Amino acid sequence: RKRERERGHRARVCFASAPRQVDKFACFFPDGPRILSSRFVSFRFVFSLALAASMRALQNATSFNASTSGRQSKDSVFFLRRRSLTHRELGCRMMIDNQGESSSDGGKRKREKRRRDVKRQSSLQKSGVLWNRTRHASVLRKTCESLFASCEPVSIELFEQHENEEREGAGRGDTGKVPVYVMLPLDTVWRQEVGGVYNPVLKTPKALNECLQRLKAAGVTGVMVDVWWGMVEADAPGKYNFDAYLELLRMAALNGLKVQAVMSFHAAGGNVGDNVNIPLPDWVLQVGEEQPDIFYTDASGCRNPECLSLGCDNEAVLHGRTPVEAYRDFVKAFLSATEGYLGWVVSEVTVGLGPAGEMRYPSYPEGDGRWRFPGIGEFQCYDAYMLEDLKEKAKEVGHPEWGHGGPHDSGNYTKCPWETGFFHPQSGSYKTEYGDFFLQWYSDLLIDHGDRVLASVTEVVREQCPPEMAVECLLGDGSKKVRQLEEVKVGIKLAGVHWWYKSGSHAGELTAGYYNTRQRNGYRSIMKMLKRHNAVANFTAVEMRDCEQPEYAKCSPQGLLAQLQEDAVAFGIPLSGENALQRYDKFALDQIEHASYGEETIENCPQLKRLTFLRMGQSMFDNWDAFESFIARMNRRVPDDAAPINNVAV
């Protein structure tokens, strides 16, 4: 740059993608090329030039010969090259010219031709894919070599052949199989004090490894684990510790198990089956003490510190970051730390969107005693952010009097629909114009919350997760097997609010944020949102039967599941299932199998794409025979065929 300044030239920069490593800086001057070492050129300087580049300059610079007017003595081209990549693969060009060239008619015509060439070649996209593949191949190789005796990423030219081989093998043995994952205990990772510092560690690593071996021998595909926000980012914003989870992924890989990682942005201890207490990060709770409106609030002013209110999604309340930015940074840090396991161990990233990790409002908090089954719950819209939004929406529709809060006659947590004015079966005001306005607003906020978080997270997943690649592993018998890395899915959880499903209002669903009534399908809009992000839906009540529920509560878990299955098929959304209660009786296990496969399948495919069984623990091993037989049936084989296999796996 200094030498060019002496020549009086003006610099215009064209940069397709910033390389991570710069070996040499080739300068083509009028009097001939010179090769400079990278130590003479600051990468920060190069990158700052790249950021300052205009899109017009990017489109103009498509040819290695930058001369447009024939005056070569006034033209120069800078070219950055990274090891083993040609200039077309890397797609990085820097062009220096003088001001006179920009006004040349011949230069304009050539620039138009180059714009068309850029569109045809798509060099920007190609360079990004090449760089991502090279980077991930290096990380994957190191990870696999640390686990197995032999592992080598396979060239992309072999994908089609290996993919066909895998499909042929799958067609012979696993057609129609619903993979079963087992949910690990909530306290699989725990905080241990070492020298006055609390670090997340695996609670009982030796016992955990033995349990994983038994699960694999029984035919389980993988495990689900909560990646707790309050564990990993507990000390300070932006300071993450995934060491315990990396150890868990290593165990899973050695035992041939996949992992579904749940980004748990909620606290544990206030839901059904919670036997531990894991709060939100301390620094988040400190913010909540100063700004309590970041938590969901009911009509009585009671704050719920289980998770952050969706009302502050776009408010920079977390030390200069918005909650959505904090969620995105957390997922990005997790994917960066676990990059070597993505696609072959980590199969899905489930994003927590509310209490218990489910996309809903905390309308039925059982942990503090405010709610008990089958109460209708309460609307959670009384924090300052949501009230302000409600006030604006009410003004937009010409009814400012509707913007002061939720319905005044909607009862409390433990009421039944007929005990309220809003949900009354005959005269309920939920059917009025005001009722429709409020319920639509309440539900839309929840769907918009999911849309915002998923948009942020899926972008990170696309950037961080590996491109098409295959892994060759040495099995225990000395043979080798090649497997293509799978796409890492992004999913969410939908709550199984089945009580009052047979009533006209579906009151339990309405307070939870699902505007689903006898006259209106409230889940189609959710499926439509998931379709935009190619996300997976996970329903959390597949073991329940209608006949087991109290008649007065008008429950229908089977009816709710059937509705979700129908809506998921209509929008092409993969639907997974999870049991809400830990049960091993024959009725529950049969119902799970029926929900997974059903008597009538759709286009010869299982109705559920995956089943997550809750949960690994002493109760499971006390009922091991029933569980092992259930897994065998889910794998569509007889129990005697379930033989132990080696711990070395692909």
Image (tube, rainbow, N blue to C red):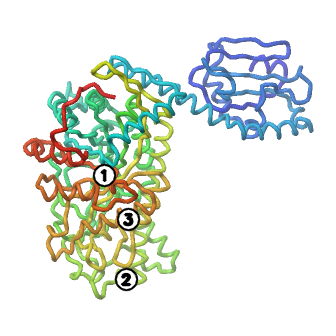
Residue 182 or 388: which is nearer the viewer? Answer: 182
Side of 98 where 365 appears, left or right:
left
Q: Which amino acid does label 3 sit on?
A: Glu
Q: Where is residue 199 in the image (x, y as percent from the top left)?
A: 25, 31
- Location of the N terminus by quadrant is top right
The residue indicated by pointer 1 is: 357
Q: Which mark is residue 431?
A: 2
Q: Label 2's element?
A: helix
Determine whether 146 is above or below 53 in the image: above
Marks 2 and 1, how far apart at CA: 30 Å
Q: Is tag 2's residue or tag 1's residue first in the polypeptide sequence?
A: 1
Q: Is tag 3's residue or tag 2's residue first in the polypeptide sequence?
A: 2
Q: What residue type is labelled 2?
A: Lys
Q: What residue type is labelled 1?
A: Gly
Q: Residues within 10 Å of mark 1 (few under 14, many from 20)?
A: many
Q: Residues within 10 Å of mark 3 (few under 14, many from 20)?
A: few
- In this view of the protein, can residue 505 be seen by the observer? yes
Q: Where is residue 424 in the image (x, y as percent from the top left)?
A: 27, 83
The residue indicated by pointer 3 is: 566
Residue farthest along the left direction in this orientation: 622
Residue 102 or 486: which is nearer the viewer? Answer: 486
Marks 3 and 1, how far apart at CA: 23 Å
- In this view of the protein, can residue 380 be seen by the observer? no
Query: Based on the displayed image, in which of its 4 quarters is residue 108 positioned?
Result: top right
Q: Label 3's element?
A: helix
Q: Which residue is drawn at 39% across and 52% down?
A: 536
Residue 479 or 422: which is nearer the viewer? Answer: 479
Q: Which of marks 3 and 2 is in front?
A: 3
Determine whether 11 is above or below 223 in the image: above
Q: Position of residue 570 (x, y in %)?
A: 44, 63
Marks 3 and 2, how far apart at CA: 25 Å
